Image (cartoon, rainbow, N blue to C red):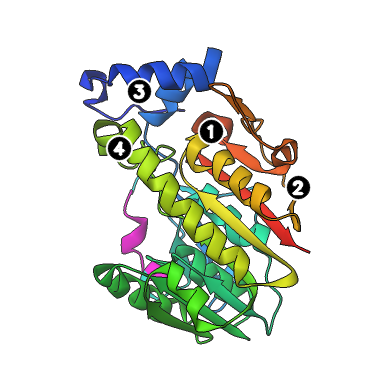
Amino acid sequence: MLERIPGTEDIELKPKFVEHYKKLCGPRYDDFLQYSFSYPRRSIRVNTLKSSVEQVKELLPQWKLDPIPWIKEGFWVSSERRDIGNTAAHMLGAIYVQEAASMIPPLVLNPEENSLVLDMAASPGSKSTQLAAMMNNTGLLIANDINAARMKPLGINMQRSGAHNMITTRMMGQSFRKKGMEFDHILLDAPCSGTGTIRKSLKTVTIWNPGMIERLARTQTQLLDVAYDILKAGQSMVYSTCSCEPQENEAVIDHLLQRNDGATIEKIDLPLNRSKPILELDEKHYASEIKNALRIWPQDNDTEGFFVCKIRKE
């Protein structure tokens, strides 16, 4: 049952935002607003480096756990309490409080044990710690971020989760091209406008503007070009954002495909509701194989909005 966030009835949306999203959503525009201004469902991921589902259930007797269909370690949680982050299970690292759609990119990347993996924009570490658990603390995971202030939560979450195969670095993602390294797998959860996360951060609708989207898209394109260059041949990477903007998603992937004949988009098969990727907008046409990418609106699964694309380098 959706519960509207108090005060959102008084939010005045920018005319350009309304026009743009009515074009993107069509008859689902009202649903988009309804979910974007309603409280998000709380969810957790069981940290298999420290605990099991059975142990977590014992640690959280006051919480109802409903399985998230697309990940066996993920659960939606409900209780009279709202402070799941203050529980012993969280403080001990047995669980990670993580939005359900945010668990998808590492799941799609699916790194093997003993592999070399890069999380190019890692803080605060939700996806990095998930990757470490999937790798069973083997191999090497480099968790990078550019922002010095964001290194603290990344380090704290890494330690709390017991991720021993992970090191942190602080530099521009573009700098990895100069290091001469090649990776088995790369996750680029790119910095974005966050228009899929309005329900978590209401200021997103107040700061939204077309110029910001253009600037972000340029950075995302640069980062994806670098990530593809340092990915080993025959391997796959994942590009993702919590944005609903085609300019930050389908257009960025289209740019990569135009520049690299060896890049292919792999299908993503997960048990969830999805929307068709946007292949045409404002007289711009994007490569047809982008239809294999995963586009999720908040109203599709009552989650954040997300875009996930798995790219293979031949």
| Local SS, label 3 | helix
Q: What separation in Å lies between label 2 and label 3 (alpha carbons)?
A: 32 Å
Q: Which of the two discs, 2 and 4, sits closer to the camera?
A: 4
Q: Pointer 3: what residue?
A: 17
Residue occupying image coordinates x 25% and y 19%: 9
Label 2–label 3 contact, CB within 8 A: no
The reply to whether the magenta stretch includes residue 83 is: yes
Q: What separation in Å lies between label 3 and label 1 (alpha carbons)?
A: 16 Å
Q: Mark 3 or mark 2, which is nearer the start of the sequence?
A: 3
Q: Pointer 4: what residue?
A: 204
Residue 79 horizontal side relative to residue 185, left or right: left
Q: What separation in Å lies between label 4 and label 1 (alpha carbons)?
A: 16 Å
Q: What separation in Å lies between label 4 and label 3 (alpha carbons)?
A: 11 Å
Q: What's the magenta bit mostly, secondary-structure-wise?
A: helix
The reply to whether the magenta stretch includes residue 262 is: no
Amino acid residing under circle 3? Phe
Residue 5 horizontal side relative to residue 276, left or right: left
Amino acid residing under circle 2? Asp
- Residue stretch rendered in magenta on the structure: 82-90
